[in-house]
Amino acid sequence: MTSEALLGTSDLPHQLPRFADISDGDYGPALEVAMADQLRAIAAITGNPDAATFDNTLVPLERSGIGLTRVLRVFSNKASADSSPAVDAVRAEFAPRLAAHSDAILLDADLWARLQVVEGQRSSLAPEASYLVERYIIEFRLAGAALGDDEKQRLRALNEEISSKETAFELALQADSNDLAVVIDDVADLDGLTHGEISAAAAAAEARGLTGKYLLTLVLPTAHPHLAALTGRDVRRRLSEAQRARGSRGGAHDTRAIALDILRLRAERARLLGFDNHAAVVTADNTAGTPKAVRSLLERLAAPAARNARREQEALSAEAGFAVEAADWAFYAEKVRSAQYDVDLAALRPWFEAERVLRDGVFFAAERLYGLTFVERPDLPGYHPDVRLFEVSQDGTPIGLYLLDLYTRDSKRGGAWMSSFVSQSELLGVDSAVVVNNLNVPKPAAGQATLLTWDETRTLFHEFGHALHGLLARATYPKFSGTAVFRDFVEYPSQVNEMWILWPDVLASYALHHETGEPIPADVVARIVAAETFNEGFGTSEYLAAALLDLAWHELAPDEVPTDPDAVAAFEQQALAAVGLDNAAVPPRYATSYFAHSFSSGYASAYYSYIWSELLDADTVAWFKENGGLTRENGDLYRRHVIGIGGTRDPLESYEEWRGRPAPIEPLLARRGLA
Ligand SMILES: [Zn+2]
């Protein structure tokens, strides 16, 4: 059959998927077969007449999803990194079916009964097996497994309604963003933008039939990147107001009523599951544990961040000669940055040639820390001609493959991410891992070097931190393999890997001018380091404001959620004022009406995760610095307690065992200039 290449194991090195044998038409049939296989395997577990044990319930349950996981990994990557209308159609068709499939398993009463029996046997199990039972019990309970039949029916209806409202939010927001794109008649108004940006704006206008004009399309966060460059105050205001207006203008594309419906439905679902609110459900399945723990960290940071932002605001206003508003902030921040620190990040690109950054920076640090070496394998096929494959060895023993898909293209979604094709698992007899990093770096003309921006360099180190996590984790059970850790923990290893960008040995190895071979000047590096906390009052405040809004909305009980869309602004104002973050010049990174993380992607009441992980990151960076930095000994310790354990145990417990205490807040305060 045609979907064999997706369903079967691969005979390529490290079980690299057989991309060359897979076509777009194979995904649908393969998903059908894999879902049916899993349900058959579950039926065999629940139909087993023997009393439930770990070996006759958990082990086959872990094995039951292998085929579906294999298909989904290849498919999700394809849908994100190299999609097509056919693949998009399969995704739309299968999204609700996959949700129903997972509900069918999580709400299976017989399976739940067996899990509970095995829960009683935990004390006789090995630690990882015992933790596996614990995790399954929590996951099933949060999905509603313990409910009665009528309640389960209500839960299914709520899940369906929430999911369709989330889609409605996404579509309305997209439509309103398109409508609100700013049309510019006179190119003089674009003063400050680069040639490339101006021609992109002309092309965007042309595509809408607005020949001879310019179109500034909107981006998700409140602050549009063009605001840093546009010299005209009026055009900055127009752009900023358009960004802020999204989803809140009434009419068909207003997202506020949808958001309130979603909040009410999520709150009702939380009550059904026995929790006070949705935030309690989400944090229960994360390392944070409770909304209170999250709130206490966010509030601890809010006051000093707001104070720093006000100080920055005064400096910017002094530079501008008037009181700067949200629309002016980035423009004057850039002026002050270059005056105070003389750092022009754009001028650094010749020192960040992609191949050097990769081999002499990213790979170099991984070799020093973990003994990893990388050999390119042009003989192995990727899923797109741009994809490069490297065989990864540790101390000479091959442990997997690292795929790098650096360049942007029309078929790739925006952003940067890591995903896994194969994860190590002792139970499944898989020794290797196969991981991919996707970025969206513009491809240079043929024969030209790829020069990365400062941000792209940081992103590559960051995503490679996820890749290391995926490559180095060792687990018995597939549920715990690779980067399968809590959402509010998963960004921590990737954030840590960013520390090597400016580490002197690493920098000396990779940051050489691509034409002259000259190292990056020491004074430039010193100024970059000095400028690191610049504008962090703003950056931290706008992030915290969004995280607090996301939390505050999801702390409401069903009957506390307002019904009037016009009440949204008042709620936002009150929630921010309560923590001192109600500064109009520093709006939240996302406001309710365009908060896609909160209302249409999986980050509802989990937007705090970034700073939560950064608490551990900052403490870990401090530890590396105190202990000699880039050494194999340090890498091995960090691997043994953090990135080498996958999800096999409580990650905070392991962390605290290593450090002898929980992560203190001071390193985070210092890094963000909040001490
Ligand atoms: Zn990340």
Image (cartoon, rainbow, N blue to C red):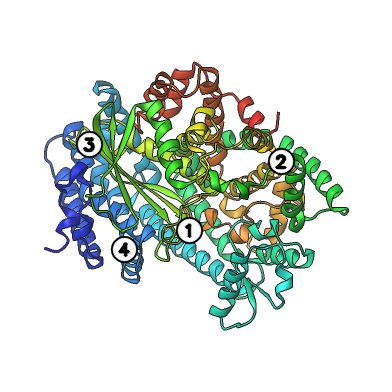
Q: Secondary structure at mark 4?
A: helix
**Label 1 belongs to which residue?**
442
Q: Quadrant of residue 377?
A: top left
Q: Secondary structure at mark 2?
A: helix
Q: Residue 40: give x, y in percent of width and height.
A: 16, 52
Label drawn at residue 537: 2
**Label 4 belongs to which residue?**
94
Q: Secondary structure at mark 1?
A: loop
Which callout, 4 or 2, points at the residue further toward the start of the chain? 4
Q: Residue at x 32, y 29 (%)?
A: 131
Q: Are marks 2 and 3 in contact (CB under 8 Å)?
A: no
Label drawn at residue 58: 3
CA gap, disc 4 to disc 3? 27 Å
Which callout, 2 or 3, points at the residue further toward the start of the chain? 3
The amino acid sitting under disc 2 is Gly
Q: Residue 71: give x, y in percent of width and height.
A: 24, 54
